[in-house]
Image (tube, grey):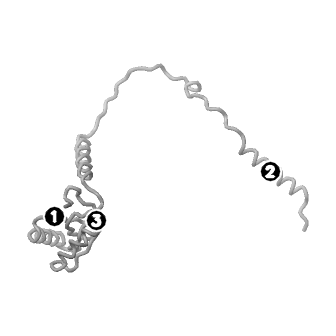
Amino acid sequence: MQIPKSFFLGLAIIASVAMTAQNIAPEPAVPLDRVLPMPPATHGSVEVIRDHRVDEIIKMHKVFNERRQDEIMGYRVQIYFDAGNNSLERAQTEARTYQMLYPDDTAYVSYSEPYYKVRVGDFRTRLAAEGFLQQILGVYPNAFVIKDRVRLSAIKP
């Protein structure tokens, strides 16, 4: 079957029209006030009615951000994690036990579904965290180093 020459001629015309259609310059923008008449400037008043709880949320947000300024990414040693019934109580007990054994350090209890975790220490580098881990492995044989947000003010020089 032979394709007629008129088919190719039509295809060339359509292609050239499509290419030139994309090269047409856009019309210049017309300022909106020339198209739609703007009313003269008038003075008005706005009354904002909001729930009193909005102020409380704003205060909480400020406190949260102030705390975050004292935090950086660093390392902690995780000494405990558990899920299930009474896992919060067991984590708190483990944190208190750690505080009694190491009163100069801080234990942090956190929750990340479904686990309650106890992490200790505030270390800028993994090397410092690993060194501390070696000191406590006798008491906490399952402990390990983990990357976490740490308090800048609690990092020991």
Q: Position of residue 129 (x, y in %)?
A: 24, 69
What is the crowding at mark 1: few (fewer than 14 residues within 10 Å), some, or many (at least 20)?
Answer: some
Foreground of the two, 124 or 22: 124
Q: Position of residue 53 (x, y in %)?
A: 23, 43
Task: Count neighbours of disc 3 (C-alpha within 10 A) and say few if under 14, some if 14 to 19, many if 20 or more.
Answer: few
Q: Which mark is residue 106?
A: 1
What numbered label is drawn on residue 131?
Answer: none
Give the SS element for disc 2.
helix
Question: Disc 2 designates what residue?
Answer: 14
N-terminal of the pair, mark 1 or mark 3, is: 1
Residue 136 appears left or right of 35 = left
Q: Is residue 18 above or below residue 104?
A: above
**Residue on which the image places disc 3:** 125
Q: Nearer the viewer, mark 1 or mark 3?
A: 3
Q: CA distance from mark 1 to mark 2?
A: 76 Å
Disc 2 from disc 3: Cα separation = 66 Å
User: Split into 4 quadrants, where in the image is the C terminus?
Assistant: bottom left
- Determine the residue positioned at 22% across, 63% down: 122
Pick whichever of labels 1 and 2 is earlier in the sequence: 2
